[in-house]
Amino acid sequence: KVLVVDFGGQYNQLVARRVRECNVYCEIVSYRVGIEAIRAQKPKGIIFTGGPNSVYVDGAPSIDPAIFEMGVPVLGLCYGCQLMMHELGGHVCKAPEREYGKTLVHVNTDSEIFAGVSPDTICWMSHNDYVETAAPGFTISAYTDNCPVAAAEMPEKNLYALQFHPEVLHTPEGKTMLHNFVYRVCGCKGDWKMDSFVETSVKALREKIGSGKVLCALSGGVDSSVAAAMLSKAVGKQLTCVFVDHGLLRKNEMEEVCEVFGPNGQFELNFVCVNARQRFYDKLAGVEEPEKKRKIIGEEFIRVFEEEAKKIGAVDFLAQGTIYPDVVESGLGGESTVIKSHHNVGGLPDYVDFKEIVEPLRDLFKDETRQAGRELGLPEYLVSRQPFPGPGLAIRIIGAVTPEKVKMVQEADAIWREEIAKAGLDKSISQYYAALTNMRSVGVMGDERTYDYAVALRAVTTTDFMTAEAAEIPWSVLQTVTSRIVNEVKHINRVLYDCTGKPPATIEFE
Ligand code: XMP
């Protein structure tokens, strides 16, 4: 495997992604783990990431320079490049000209890293400091108008340094460079594949769990479904999945989950489907404040889950569908600052009797998780599902939740989703749904005056869900959806389209 040593840069996950796209397994470790921990992992190659610091400042993130003598190839990117130069005797200082954005770089195509790359290529630069002089023994293999050392290398020791970011798509030939590093320099074979990942994970889970019992809270979302499928493959009936229907799911969602994981499905496991709808509706009655609604649902969810767990008795493992971005986001795996606190329903139940947590997807990115789900035989509608918030439709019904309103929003949402898919827009929109506003307005239907609710349609495009833009929906699609909703869904007489981006709005309404 290849190790990505994290110095706090914002593209670190991307670096790991690109390496895995070369079918080479890769993990990210913090520079703080130190050289011995890195050596112990016996990596075939090491990549230093970028980072926000200046290498020459006291206390800047650093690593024992003995790492360059381990006989393992090292590729330094941006901060990592500067660190390598600085530690080995080069000179790094504030650049007279800050470089940011797409930059023309002249590269020496005789270099192993630049094999197959055009001599003049566009690379993404983002740096305030620069390497003024390369470390002794290094040759300069790329430069720009403002940057005398855009790349340097010492091939006899397999040390390579790039000032720019090959991992981002703005560096069109970056993939080739990373490919060259892992194949030509590190000698990786590229035999890591999703099916082998699934196979090895299933085997490892079997070993870890032995004859133990496993309990898994299944939400019907991608991550918990894939985790459940993998555990079922590993330990079959030793696994019990509890699915709580809180009455705030999308239309037919409960039925779909039961079809896949229930007794008539293809997976071997104990499946418990809890109909807790009324409990949630009772608790939510009259509650209008969004945060209060979220809290009630989170707490009630845990309570229902605990009650079910009590019926099952002591278990050895509690399974979680944590995926790699969750690990990094919650600040456990990476150096970058916590981006958002993770908000899945409830967190960990306190009173479930278990010994250990098992997280089969901890090393996977989202699209890899989906791929693993396909390998495990989950249906496409489950693995390609768009994100759905833990509190469900409660945060898509503005104001107090009632069963009647849930029904209205479910129906309107189903029509919206159906028409988006029919128009072939579903792949290009990141998330779309209908929300029920608490605005009632006057309308006319036939000869009758109506006084009914307005539904708001939302559709956004985004890559990271931290920022988003309202999607451009063809007018004809909006018209079809509007007329279907007002005709088919009782008590809705107006349809609005939300044009707001995030910021200033959020993706959800509450
Ligand atoms: P916002 O509304 O914060 O949403 O822009 C960003 C993304 O997060 C999802 N979301 C949630 N997911 N539990 C979840 O598991 C929640 O409480 C929750 N709230 C928002 C939202 O659907 C969007 O994809």
Image (tube, rainbow, N blue to C red):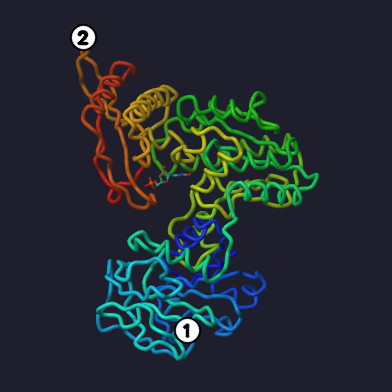
Q: Quadrant of residue 8?
A: bottom left
Instruction: Judge from the rendering whether residue 77 lies leftward or rightward of residue 256; answer left or right.
Output: left
Mark yes or no: residue 382 visible: yes
How far from the left and from the top, in percent, is residue 275?
Answer: 58, 26
- Quadrant containing ligand 1 reads top left
Q: Name the residue nearer the viewer: 357 or 76.
A: 76
Confirm if mark 2 falls within 8 A of ligand 1: no
Dot label at residue 167: none
Q: Secondary structure at mark 2?
A: loop
Mark yes or no: residue 509 visible: no
Q: Give the answer, above or below, for where 311 lies relative to 64.
A: above
Mark found first going from the N terminus, 2 or 1? 1
Instruction: Judge from the rendering whether residue 352 lies leftward or rightward of residue 246; answer left or right.
Output: right
How far from the left and from the top, in percent, is residue 409?
Answer: 38, 27
Quarter of the image containing the C terminus? top left
Q: Residue at x 36, y 36 (%)?
A: 432
Find disc 1 in the rendering and name its residue: 59
Q: Residue at x 58, y 42 (%)?
A: 224
The amino acid type of the residue labelled 2 equals Gly
How far from the left and from the top, in percent, is residue 21?
Answer: 49, 55
Q: Name the residue nearer the viewer: 508 or 48.
A: 48
Q: Residue at x 47, y 77 (%)?
A: 160
Instruction: Judge from the rendering whether residue 304 lies leftward or rightward of residue 438; answer left or right.
Output: right
For the residues labelled 2 and 1, say whether their Cβ atoms are less than 8 Å apart.
no
Q: Quadrant of residue 436?
A: top left
Distance from Cα at disc 2 to Cα at disc 1: 75 Å
Dot 2: few (<14), some (14–19), or many (≥20) neighbours within 10 Å? few
Q: Residue at x 53, y 65 (%)?
A: 183
Q: Give the answer, above or below, for where 465 lies relative to 248.
A: below
The amino acid type of the residue labelled 1 equals Gly
Find disc 2 in the rendering and name its residue: 446
